[in-house]
Each structure stands twice: as structure tokens, then as C-alpha cells.
Image (cartoon, rainbow, N blue to C red):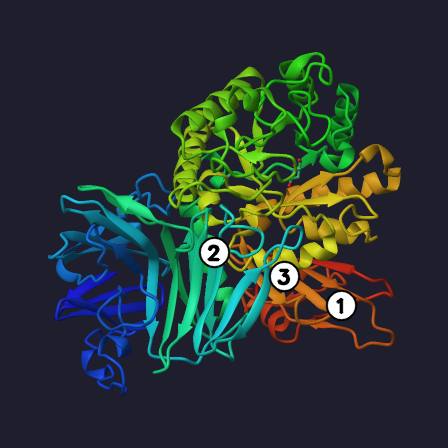
Amino acid sequence: MIEFQNQIFHLHAGGMSYIFGIEEGVPQMYYWGKTVEVSDLKGLMSQGGMGWSTQADTQLLEMPVYGTGDYRSPMLEIEFADGSGVTEFRYQSHRIYDGKPKLNGLPATYTEQEKEAQTLEIVLYDALKKTEAVLLYSVFENGALARSIRLKNNSSEPLKMKRILSASVDFYDDDFETLTLHGSWARERHVERGKLFHGKKSISSSRGASSHHKNPFLALVRPYTTEQQGEVYAMNLIYSGNFEAAAELSSYPLTRMQIGINPFGFAWELGAGQEFQAPEAILVYSDMGLNGMSRIYHDLYRNRLCRGKYRSAVRPVLVNNWEATYFDFTEEKLIALAKEGKEIGAELFVLDDGWFGKRNQDNCSLGDWKVNMEKIPHGLEDLAAKVTEMGLRFGLWFEPEMVNPDSDLYRAHPDWCIHTEGRPRTESRNQLVLDLSRPEVCDYIIDAVSAVLSSAKITYVKWDMNRSMTEIPRSDTAHKYMLGLYRVMETVTSRFPEVLFEGCSGGGGRFDGGMLYYMPQIWTSDDTDAYERLFIQYGTSMVYPVSAMGSHVSAVPNHQTGRITPLKSRGDVAMSGNLGYELDLSKCSPEEKEQMKAQIAFYKANRELVQFGDFYRIESPFEGNYAAWQFVSKDKQESILYAFKKMTVPNGKPKRVKMTGLDKDTYYETTYQNQRIKGDVLMNVGIILEETAQDFESFAIKMTAVPDVSAGKE
Ligand code: DGJ
């Protein structure tokens, strides 16, 4: 997978080649794209230059730095003790080995067997300032490329890092568009495609979390690239904090693509002898469109980023009390809801916010992780036991990273929140962020959460986080917070390996690869309106596997949008993720409950396909009146198509949907008019949706391969 010859590195796997060479000690980028066999591309590189410029400004640089004539954004920006910032890193050595190293304190993809990936470490050295940069590359069998950088200060004086990005790639090309995921609370990860312009186009977060607003993902796509075909170059950062991703078109014009910790608001002092490890970026090339890119990310993240029992165990169908009761619950109400959940077939009952301290609204008690005996008079152990006796598992909500000023924790430790002396402490949802850059705060959280988890039979945790950071005291606080949070999560999740952890941040405010390393599923959005979820789940699936997405059926009118949608459509959207129900089941009619029962039964029979099969986006809700996606089992024996019509068009032309990912020669028994249809017909001719005059109508078609009936054999 990694070859080195004539000073040229050729990293290749899964249809992708990434080639760069060392010229006069400097790593120069040659090529990233579809596999080529020849790696000596030196003679094919541009020898040109432009007026009023330097050589560095027109080169394709593998680790661009500041100070010697490259005027584009650097990957590294250092201020040395004497105030200077010019660096000159030169190749010193490299090593290539099987497997992949752990990244100290950071989430990262991994291998279970060494042959699954190969790693290249290149040591570059600035002799004047005795500073070492190690470029790390690991190529996985499926073509995903993990990149990061480690900086070491070998001098006797401290230095200040003002920027250390994880990956930077220069392209000779400029025929690209950008594709990013943007949004806000309740409207996360909407797909946005746009033009490059001369200058730097960037997305970022400075909120202390990866954020609802921008996701740490950037793709460069050819103008002709679609879901099914065309070239895509993507970067995704395995990090849950502040990030920046940028595409810069220089005057030459060359395109530079970068991702890493957001340099804005960041600085890090590296003392003599100290090292800094940057988070990992996952680079994916696909010449099979956006779906090709997504499948590489999905497989890698499901199998070699997620860990623990639930990496490959099917996810339980849950009932959550949040939209059913909000804070207004009693033990009886909870038991009644769990019972109704059990009756429709749910497997897990989740008690959400409001079970601890004196919390009856969102204005107090975060930090005081002791059960509220007024609301739950027999305690958590008893409640969990009662739910367990019903044949359900019991799950619990926490928001461990936060504190309300009205809490015993805050009264005891007012200095434990993120704050700047002499400045106001801006509250959001009446709460402040605990300062996880402080080890004693992390230890408190570990102990408090562990005590609750040990006190009752709890097999699921929803780990919420409901505000952004403000009044951040120092330029290293936000990253130190992430390192503290990762230590907390590593400790708690490994202490309770049987517990299924679901990440959450006011819905999908921290839906990123960093979280998936600790928690294999994430609550996708607080917006439970199935119509809105079409966009959110479609966008989320660009990078993240369906098994990562929590998705619930909720009441109508929907609590976020007021929209009234059919139960079938709500079910079909929620079944396109990890299915749950989040509504007051006592208010549902017997017919509705029967329908939910059928949904859960169908989901249970098909969830392996949904959670672990290949996922294909077919029709984008961002582009037309329909959304459609398809699940195909790895052996292509089973498939489900979900299609959704947004609005009824009077006297409109019925929609034809073409399947994808099936075996062309296999016959499938389908629920489409109970017809037996061959794979190539389903994929090339397609089926016509049998629409009625109903807005937001959904269609589900199950396809099952007919054994021994293939072309010519029937
Ligand atoms: C935000 C979450 O996203 C919701 O699902 C719910 O858990 C509330 N917090 C509870 O405060």
C-alpha cells in the first residue's frame, strides 16, 4: 500500500493513489486521484512560475509553512521565543510499517490486524530552531487515508504554535466546486454546494464544539459530479472542537485544501522537549460520485472508528420520555409510558432530562447528579428494576459537562466553569460550561457519572451538551477542554463496556468522528419533524453511517415545526436510522399503536440491513420534490428503498425511481405490486411510485433475492 522509490512516496489502496516526493528536502505533492501504477511523476510537474512571485508560491507543497515565499495559508504557524516565525523544515528520515499508531489522547481510526493499514511517518527538521515535524499517513485497504502531524520542540526554549492543521493538499487543478454541511440548531447538516473563487473559502467553528452550524467536513467535487458518478476529494476531521476547513484558489491558479483545529482563538505553548499531536483528518477520494465517497467513510467509521460491543451489535428500539413529558413526569407516568412502549415492541426505555437535583425546568441542578426523590420516590435502582422486569432495558440522560449557577456544585466550586476573571459569565439555557481543561473537574465528572451508572441497572446513556463556550480564558483552553473531555469519555465508556452511549448536543451540535470513537450513535437533531429530517439525515449521511443516527417518531403537530405528517412517513424516516419513539403513547389511538407495532416489527426484521448494509442516496430533497435512499446488504441479497414525495403536484407526472447497488443478474422478489424483478431492470428502468394525493407521502419497497433464479435460469 505504501511504496518508496527515487525519493517518491506512493500511497495507494482501494482505487486511490496519493503521490508526493522529496525535492531538495521539501515534500512536494504530485498527485491525488484514481490509482496509477507509475509513481515517478516528477517530470510531469509544472516547471512554470509567475511574475512577482516566488518558487514556493507556485509549488504544490505537502506541508506548507510560513515565511519563505508561499503566500497561501500555511499548515503550521509558529512563533519562536525570539519572536521570529520563519521555518525551514527539511526531510530527515521516514519509516513505513504495517498497522496504525494510536494518537495520544485523541480519538482516531484504528486497525485490529496490522495488515488492514500501512503507515508512513516522515520526519522533517528545522535545524536552526531544533523543531521536528512528523507527518503521519495511514492508508486503509478501502482507500481511506488518515493524516495528521506531530510537532516536537527539541530546543531549550518554549515556542508558541499559532496554527497546526492536520492536513493540507495542493492540487494543480482548479476545476472544483465545494460541498459542505451547514445548518443551525434543529436544521443541522444541510448540503451546500458552491463555486470556488480566487481567495480562501472556509467554514469553521469557534463555539468550543464542532457545532450545529458547520460540520468538520469539506469536499471538492468536479462540476459534473453527482451522487452516482464523478470525482470527489473529501476531508473530515476526527475532532469535536473548534475546526477550520478551507479551499483556497490562488492566483496561479492552484487549489489548496486544508482541515484542522481552528487557528482563530488558538495558541499553544510547546515547552522545551514537549510534543503536540494534532487530530486526525480522514481523506477520501472517489471517482464514483458522492455515494462512493460516503461508502468509504461509512465502512471505515462503522468498523474502525466506532468501538466496543455496539460497534457491530444491532441497536435497540427505544422509547424516550422527552417529547412525551418534558420535565413534567412522575414515576407512575414513566412506568406507564415504558409499559406502552413495551406493548408496541420497544426494547429500551430512556429517562431523559429532569430526574436529578431539583430539576423541574431547565434553570437548575446541572452538576448535581443525584436522583430527585420527590419525582422518583423509590429511587433509580427501583425504577430501573421495574423497567427491566417489564422486559425492557433502562437508559438515562446526563449532561455531564455543564453546571447551572443554581446548583450545589456551582455553590461549592464557582471557579469550575469556563470564565474569564472580571468578565460577565454569559449564560445560555441558564447554564455554564464546566472547565474540562482542569483535571479535577474531569475527575469529578468521571466519579459522578460512574456513581450513578453503578447504582442501578442502566444499559444506555444519552450524553447531552447544550451550549457553546463563551468567555474562554486562554487560547489553549478550548483544545485542552477537548483533551479533558476525551479522557472523561474514554474512562467512563471503558468502565461500563455493556452500556450503549448515545452522544447528543442539543440534537446534532457535536455530530463528528471524534464523538463516534466513544459513542457509536448520536442524536441527529432536536428536530423530530420527519419532513425536516429528510434534509438532516440526507446531509448527515454524506459522511456518517446510518448506524450513527438516532431517529425518532414523534407526535403531530410536530413540536418544533407544528407540521402534521402521516405516521407512515414518520416511521419510514425514523426507520432509516436507529429507530425510537418519543411521544406520549397514551394519547395515541389503538390504530396508531397497531401501526407503530408493525413498524417496529418490520424494523427488527430488517435492522441489520439498515444499520450495517450499504447506503445509497438516490434522490436529493435539496434538489427536487422527492427524496429517496436505499439500503443494500453487503451480499446484495436484500434491499429496502425508501422514497418520499414532499408535496403533491396536481396532475403531475408520476415519479420513476431507479435503484442502485443491486446485483444486475439477480431476480428480486419485491413488495412493488408483489412483482419479481431482475436487478438490471430495477436499476436501469426503475419503478414508478404509486402516488396518492397526499403531501409528504412515503414509499417503502423491500427487495429479496430469489435463490437460484438468475439470468437465463428461470
Ligand atoms: C437537548 C436534547 O437534544 C433533547 O433531546 C433533550 O434531551 C433535551 N436536551 C433535554 O434537556
Cα separation, mark 2 vs mark 1, equals 36 Å
Which secondary structure lies at badge 1?
A: loop
Which comes sooner in the sequence, label 3 or label 2? Answer: 2
Q: Name the side, left or right, on which 99 lies relative to 498.
A: left
Q: Residues within 10 Å of mark 2 (few under 14, many from 20)?
A: many
Q: Name the side, left or right, on which 90 lies relative to 422.
A: left
Question: Which residue position holds label 2?
Answer: 216
Which comes sooner in the sequence, label 3 or label 1? Answer: 3
Which secondary structure lies at badge 2?
A: loop
Which secondary structure lies at badge 3?
A: strand
In the image, which is nearer the foreground, mark 2 or mark 1?
Answer: 2
Q: Which mark is residue 629?
A: 3
**The disc labelled 1 sits on which kind of residue?**
Leu
Q: Is residue 582 above or below residue 363?
A: below
Cα separation, mark 3 vs mark 1, equals 14 Å
Q: Name the side, left or right, on which 705 lies relative to 634.
A: right
The answer as to whether callout 1 falls within 8 Å of ligand 1 is no
Q: Quadrant of residue 673?
A: bottom right
Q: Which mark is residue 689?
A: 1
Residue 244 makes an appearance in the image? yes
Cα separation, mark 3 vs mark 2, equals 24 Å
In percent of width and height, residue 353 lies at 67, 30
